[in-house]
Image (cartoon, rainbow, N blue to C red):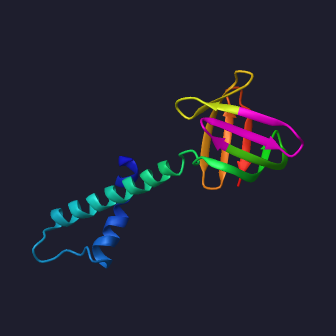
Amino acid sequence: MGGVLRGSWWLWEWLGRWTIFRQTPSMNTTESYTMLKRISYILTASIVALECISLIPIAAHASLNATCQFKQQRMPCSVVNRNGWWTIAWQDGVTEKYKELSGGRLQDKRGGIWTIYSRQKHTYFQHSNGNIIDIFY
């Protein structure tokens, strides 16, 4: 993160010249630079925190209609996340259940371990063997 902020000297320069953060008569250049540096750290930390929040798995739902994909095969599906269990009911009649484990992981009925990721309107399960189930809301 430090490297990104050090490379943003032009941003600090622009903020110092064109915004309310201009140097006032009571501030010397070092104080102005320090203030801009702190503001950029706060903004960067806020962006990182918001990005992490967007990766948190979706909340429990009664039932959601979605489009699911596995190995390039896409079809409508119904997704339920309730009481520590995820259920995906595919339109072709296949229904799979996954038990929630700690650390954002799921276990299927065959003992396979899946890691769950979620971002905006897309959730996906990634199996330890590399297979992925995509869920688009």
- Is residue 68 left or right of 122 when viewed as pictured? right
Examine the residues drawn in magenta and state their main secondary structure. Answer: strand
Q: For this rendering, which residue is in front, 97 or 104?
A: 97
The stretch drawn in magenta includes residue 82: yes
Q: Is residue 107 above or below residue 52?
A: above
Residue 8 lies in quadrant:
bottom left
Residue 37 lies in quadrant:
bottom left
Q: Residue at x 53, y 52 (%)?
A: 54
Judged from this view, the residue extending furthest toward the left is 26
Residue 100 seen in render: yes
Q: Is residue 13 above or below residue 93?
A: below
- Is residue 22 left or right of 119 when viewed as pictured? left
Residue 108: x %, y % from top left: 71, 27
Residue 97: x %, y % from top left: 73, 33
Q: Quadrant of the C terminus?
A: bottom right
- Is residue 95 left or right of 20 when viewed as pictured? right
Task: Give the total number of marks visible in the rendering.
Answer: 0
Range covered by the magenta-colored residues: 81-97
Residue 101 lies in quadrant:
top right
Q: Residue at x 90, y 43 (%)?
A: 92
Residue 35: x %, y % from top left: 22, 63
Q: For this rendering, which residue is in front, 97 or 55?
A: 97
Residue 7 seen in render: no
- Is residue 136 left or right of 6 when viewed as pictured? right
Judged from this view, the residue extending furthest toward the top is 111
Q: Residue at x 70, y 24 (%)?
A: 112
Q: Residue at x 56, y 35 (%)?
A: 104
Residue 136: x %, y % from top left: 72, 52
Q: For this rendering, which residue is in front, 52 or 107?
A: 107
